[in-house]
Image (cartoon, rainbow, N blue to C red):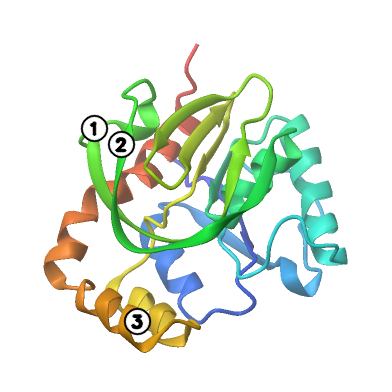
């Protein structure tokens, strides 16, 4: 079986953990593009595309965000399956006609999420599962024709629109990534300490199921549903 050619649109502003995390989780040949530097693929000739998280907001007026939206829109129109993570989830929702807004709160740490059980994206993942989250923006209105797949008390956490999938949580994160992110966030000392105390080996072990979304997404790319 040939390797899938995957475009990884890196919107993390150079986060040192990104390449390691996604290369570990994605079984394919990755072409990485630093979209924050204006580097977008020259073609849509890929088997799939994955859009990462970011510390930016998708509704900011930034040239690189608009360029990324333009490429994603063209790639979706050309039939390229997409998986968006956090900011990527929000970008895909926006491109497809949904709405992203500031939640007014910040969800961060290992949290429980519940999926509907209606999508192969969550095959072999318990209906209630744990994954790392870090976001203050959320998809507040799904794109027309999209199906909600998961949520918790904070927000929508997954949707599907044809061959486009988005997840708000971070299944790619390892403990090192989570701890570094929390350490650099502008949080009160009390909240930072509380969150760091929750970043344990046991919590990370409980989050392992959520990583199956990568395997399930790539399985759907290889064998699309009728």
Residue 48 shows in this picture: no
* Crowding near the residue tagged with mark 1, few <14, some 14–19, many ≥20 C-alpha atoms within 10 Å: few
Q: Is residue 198 left or right of residue 22?
A: left
> Considering depth in this image, is 141 or 125 the residue closer to the camera?
141
Q: Are marks 2 and 3 in contact (CB under 8 Å)?
A: no
When the figure is inspected, residue 60 is found, relative to residue 220, above or below; the finding is below
C-alpha span from label 2 to label 3: 25 Å
- The N terminus appears in which quarter of the rendering? top left
- The single residue placed furthest to the left in the displayed view is 202
**Where's residue 53, x and y in %?**
56, 61
Q: Is residue 98 left or right of residue 134?
A: right
Dot 3: what SS? helix
C-alpha span from label 3 to label 1: 29 Å
When the figure is inspected, residue 30 is found, relative to residue 96, above or below; the finding is below
In the rendered image, which residue does mark 2 sit on? 114
In the rendered image, which residue does mark 3 sit on? 192
Q: Is residue 79 left or right of residue 119?
A: right
**Where's residue 135, x and y in %?**
51, 61
**Which of the two labelled residues, at mark 2 and mark 3, occupies the earlier sequence position?**
2
Q: Are marks 1 and 2 in contact (CB under 8 Å)?
A: yes
C-alpha span from label 1 to label 2: 6 Å
Numbered tag placed on residue 127 in the rendering: 1
Q: Nearer the viewer, mark 3 or mark 1?
A: 3
Residue 146 shows in this picture: yes
Q: Nearer the viewer, mark 2 or mark 3?
A: 3
Dot 1: what SS? loop
């Amino acid at each position: 079986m040939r390797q899938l050619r995957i475009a990884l649109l890196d919107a993390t502003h150079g986060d040192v953990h990104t390449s390691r995390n996604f290369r570990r989780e994605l079984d394919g040949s990755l072409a990485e593009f630093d979209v924050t530097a204006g580097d977008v693929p020259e073609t849509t000739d890929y088997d799939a595309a994955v859009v990462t998280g970011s510390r930016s907001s998708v509704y900011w007026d930034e040239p690189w965000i608009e360029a990324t939206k333009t490429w994603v829109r063209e790639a979706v129109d050309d039939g390229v399956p997409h998986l968006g993570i956090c900011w990527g989830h929000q970008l895909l929702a926006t491109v497809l006609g949904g709405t992203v807004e500031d939640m007014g709160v910040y969800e961060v740490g290992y949290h429980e999420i519940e999926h509907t059980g209606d999508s192969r994206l969550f095959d072999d993942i318990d209906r209630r599962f744990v994954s790392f989250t870090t976001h203050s923006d959320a998809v507040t209105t799904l794109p027309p024709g999209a199906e909600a797949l998961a949520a918790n008390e904070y927000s929508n956490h997954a949707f599907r629109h044809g061959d486009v999938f988005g997840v708000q949580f971070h299944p790619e994160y390892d403990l090192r990534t989570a701890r570094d992110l929390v350490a650099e966030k502008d949080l009160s000392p009390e909240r930072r300490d509380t969150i760091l105390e929750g970043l344990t080996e046991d919590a990370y072990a409980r989050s392992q199921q959520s990583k199956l979304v990568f395997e399930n997404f790539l399985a759907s790319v290889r064998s699309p549903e009728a």
